[in-house]
Image (spheres, coloured by chain):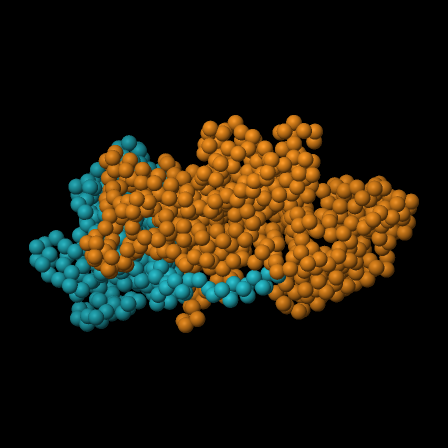
Chain colours: A orange, B cyan
Amino acid sequence: MIASARPDQQAGLHEEALASRPPVINDFSISVATKNGSGSQTANTTLLRALFKMGIPVSGKNLFPSNIQGMPTWYTIRASKDGFVARRPHAEIVVTLNPATAIEDYQSVQPGGFFMYADDIKVQLNRSDISHYPIPVKRLATENEKEPKLRTYVANMVYVGALAQLLGIDLADIESALLFHFKGKRKPVDSNMKVVRLAHQWAADNLIKTDPFRVEKMNATDGLIMIDGNTAGALGAIYGGVTFAAWYPITPATGVADALNYFLPKLRTDPDTGLPTYAIVQAEDELAALGMVVGAGWAGARAMTSTSGPGISLMTEFTGLAYFAETPAVIWDVQRMGPSTGMPTRVSQGDVLKVYFLGHGDAKHPCYLPGNVKECFEFGWRAFDLAEHLQTPVFVLSDLDLGMNQWMSEPFEYPDQPIERGKVLTAEDVKRLGGFARYRDVDGDGIGYRTLPGTDHPLAAYFTRGTGHNERAHLSERPEDWENNMARLGRKFETARKLMPKPIAEYVEGAEIGVISYGSADPAVEEARALLARAGIKTSYLRLRALPLEQTTTDFIAAHRRCYVVELNTDAQMLQLLRLHAPEFATRLAAANHSDGLPLTAEWISAAIRSGEGAAI
Amino acid sequence: MGTASLQKANVIGLQKVDYKGNDSTLCAGCGHDSIASQIITACYEMGVKPENVIKLSGIGCSSKSPAYFMNRAWGFNTLHGRMAAVATGALTANHKLIGIGVSGDGDTGSIGLGNFKHMVRRNVRMVYIIENNGVYGLTKGQFSATADVGQELKHAGKNELPPIDLCMEALLAECGFVARSFAGDPRQVVTLLKAALSHRGTAVLDIISPCVTFNNHDDSTKSYMWGKANDDRINDFTYVPHEEEITVEYEEGEIKEVTLHDGSHILLKKLDSKHDPTDRAAAIRLLEEAREKQHFITGLLYVDNRRQSLSEHLRLGDTPLALMPLERLRPSRESLDKVLESMT
C-alpha cells in the first residue's frame, strides 16, 4: 500500500478484524517521531500533561539528538492505569512526521497498534496487523497558519488534535495543558488550539477507528504534580538556602541552572530591599565554575554547581582540593552517556565510580542518589546542610532521564530541618577560646571548626591550602602530620556514612533473590519485579539512595541467595562498590547492567534476572 | 621594616608588625619578597584592616607569597592558574572583603590565562598582582609565556616564541586599572598598590619580579640589572587617600588628577611619554610600541572607574551573601505550596 491511499481504500478485511477487538483503556505507549527543532516538544508535553490532567498515570521521555534542528527525534508517552512509568521497548501507537525515519517507525509499531503519519510521506504500507491513519498535516497546518515559519510549529498540533479524537482525550484537558505550557498566555494557546480543533474535527470526519486504544478519566493523579528532576533539584537548592551558583552550559544539566534563574528572582528576592539574596554566575568553563563554588563556600556562601560527565572531569582538580582543604560545595552531576560528547543527549549512570573517588591522591565523597523527582528536591536542600556540616564537596548523582523528563510525583515536602551552617566560630567564640586549630578533631567526628573570612578577631584567620598541613593549618611536610590528617578525614567519612539517607529495603517473604538498584532505574525495576512475580519469581528490593554504603545494604545482601545489581552503565560500577563494601558476599552479587543510551525497561531487567536464574526467557 | 614604623600606629591603631606574615622561604633576594613587603607597607599605611582581607594565590613561587604577609588575613593557596575563579566566588560570597591576589606568569599567562581574562571581564573587585619573572622557578627553570623573544636560559635554551603581554590581555578584557612595575622600584610598587586597593573593580599589576636563581643573568629582560638600567617610567604619581587634602604642587598642565571609586585621588605627573592613562587606545598603542622596541615601560597604563564591579552587576546589597540571615534563605511554606500548585 502507498501512504497516499485514502483510509477507506485501506479498510480491508483485516481492519474489520482489528476493529472488533475489545477496547484497551489507559494502557499504551505512544512514540512520536519528528525532526528536532521543529517545535514538537510543545505538542508532546501537551499530550503528556493532558493525560495527566485526566487523572491517568503517565510518563514522557524525550529521545533526542545532540543537534539544534533537523535530526530525528522521538518522544515516547506511556499511559498506564497500573501506574508503571518506565520506558517500554515498543509503542503501540506510532506517529511520524519525519520522512527520514518513517520506514523504521512503521516497522516498530507493536502488532495490534496503529501508525499515524503525515500523508505526504511515502512509505510502503505492508502490515495487516496494525491500523493506518494518514493525516493531511501540511494542508491542515497551512489552512490555519499563513506565516510559513510558524507552519512547522503548528503542524505538530495536527497530530495532537487527531490523537485526541482517536483516543478520546478531552479538548478541555488539551487546552489546560497548553495553558500550563505557555504559562497562561492566551494568544499562543488560542492559535495552537485552533489547529487542534481543526485536526480533531478532520479526524472525526475522515478516520475510521479500527484500533482498540482509548483513554478514560481516572483519579490516579489527584494531588500529584508533574515536574522534571532538574527543576525539582533547583527548587530543593532554593529552599536549602543556596546563595551562590556557578555553572557552565552542558546537556543535560543546563535545566538546573535554568530553573535557578527562573525561580530564584521569584522566591529569593529580599522583600525589604528588593535585592537578590543569591548570585548566579555563568562561568567560562567547569574548572572556573567549581573554583568559584569552592571560593564562595570557603567565604561562607551556600554554593553549588551543576554539570555532567565531561564537566565532572574538569572539576576533578578542584574537587580534590576542596576535599583536602575542607571547603563545602554542592555538585550536581546530571549524568549522560559516554566520554567527551559520547551520546550527550542520552542517559547513563556512568559516573558513579569516578565521582565517588574524584580527585587526585586519596579522596572519596558523599553522593546522593535521587531515585525520583521528590528526592531531587529533598536531596537538593539536604546537600547544603551536609556540605556545611562536613565541610566537604557533596555530590548529587542525577541523570538525563530523571533530570530532563517530566515525572509525576507526590508534592514535595517542605524541609523538616532548620538550615544548618556547620561548625563556624564567631569572633566571640575565637575570643573565648583564645584562638583555634582549624583542622583539630575536637569532637571526635573528624570535623574541625572553621571561621569565615572577615570574622573580627586577630586570631580568627587561618590559611587554606592544598599543601600538607597540620592541625593549625600551617604548612607541613612531616609524615605524621600527613597521616594524622588523612586519618581524621577517614573519621569524617565515617561520620558522613551515618548521615546519608539509608537505602529503602523491601523484603518479600520467601524471596531468595534481591534486586539492588538506584536512581532513575527505579520505575523499571519496580515493574520488572511485578513481571517476575507474575512468573512466580519473588524478589526483594533495595534501592540505594546514597554513598558511602552502610550496614542496611550488607544485611540485605546477606539475607538473599543472590542479588542482581541493576544499573545503567557498562562496567557495572555500583556492583564493584558493593563488592568492595561487602567482600564476604562478593559472589552473591550479580551484574544486571545495561547501557545503550536509553532508559531501562522492565522487560530487559526481568529477562536479565530470569536468564541469571536459568529460567526460560 | 624600620624600627620607627614598628612603633607607630596607623589610622586604625595597628602597628606595622600587625601586618607581617611568616618568614619567607623563597630564595634570598627574590623579587617576590620585595613585593610582599610593599603589600605590608601599603595596607599598613592605608589602614586596611587585616581581618577584612583575603589573600589568594595559585601555585608556584609567586603563590607562596600570601603566607609572607598579613597573617591576620585569610589566605587561600588554590590551584595552579585558578586563583581568579576562587577569588570570584569568595568576593561574591562576601563583597565587603578586600581581595589581594598574588599570581605568577606561569599561573596567569599560561595555565590560568582564560580564567584570568574572564575575571577581568567580570570586573571582580580585587588587586591582582602578577609577580612576573619569565620563568618557572619551582620546576627549575623552564620558559614561561611572558619570556621575551631571544631570551636564554641555562637548561631551556633560547626562547623563540613571542611573549604574552598580560597588561595587554587585561586591557583587551576591559580592565579598568592596568599597571606595570618593577620589584626593584618599591616606591612605585607601593603607590600602585594603594591606588589599586582603591579601585572599583579588578586592578591588574604586572610586576617584573626577578628570579635570582634561574633568570637574573645580565642579558635577561626580567633581571634586576636590566630592570634598573632600562626601567622607563611613563608617569610619576602620588596617591592621596580620600580623607587627605591634595597638597602636592605641580605646574599647570603637567599633572593629571584621577579620582578613584572610594574618593581617593591619584595625581599623575606625565613624564616623557606624554601618556594619558585614561585613554585606553593610547595605552594599547603604548604597549605595542614598547613591545616593538623591547622597551620596559612602567607606571599606570590605564585607569577607568566607570565599569560596574561584579558585585554591583549582581546587585548585592549591604549584607554579604555569606552572612545572610537564615530566615532570608528559605522561602516560606506557602511559597512552596504555590510553586507546587503550578505544577499540577
**Can the viewer see residue A398?**
no
Direction from residue B71 to residue A4 in the image, left or right: right
Q: Residue at x 68, y 58 (%)?
A: A219
Residue B112: image location, x then y, percent = 37, 46
Q: Is residue A278 above or below residue A101?
A: below
Q: Residue at x 59, y 34 (%)?
A: A513
Answer with the quarter of the image where residue A469 lies.
top left
Camera-side residue of A342 and B343: B343
Direction from residue A617 to residue A515 in the image, left or right: left
Q: Is residue A247 above or below residue B156?
A: below
Q: How many marks?
A: 0
Where is the C terminus of chain B found, in terms of image quarters? Answer: bottom right
Residue B293: image location, x then y, percent = 30, 48
Camera-side residue of A209 and B295: A209
Answer with the quarter of the image where residue A226 lies.
bottom right
Q: Residue at x 56, y 40 (%)?
A: A507
Residue B90: image location, x then y, percent = 35, 55
**Can the viewer see residue A479?**
yes
Q: Residue at x 17, y 41 (%)?
A: B28
Answer with the quarter of the image where residue A45 lies.
bottom right
Can you name the residue that lies furthest to the left here? Answer: B3
Residue A367: image location, x then y, percent = 46, 44
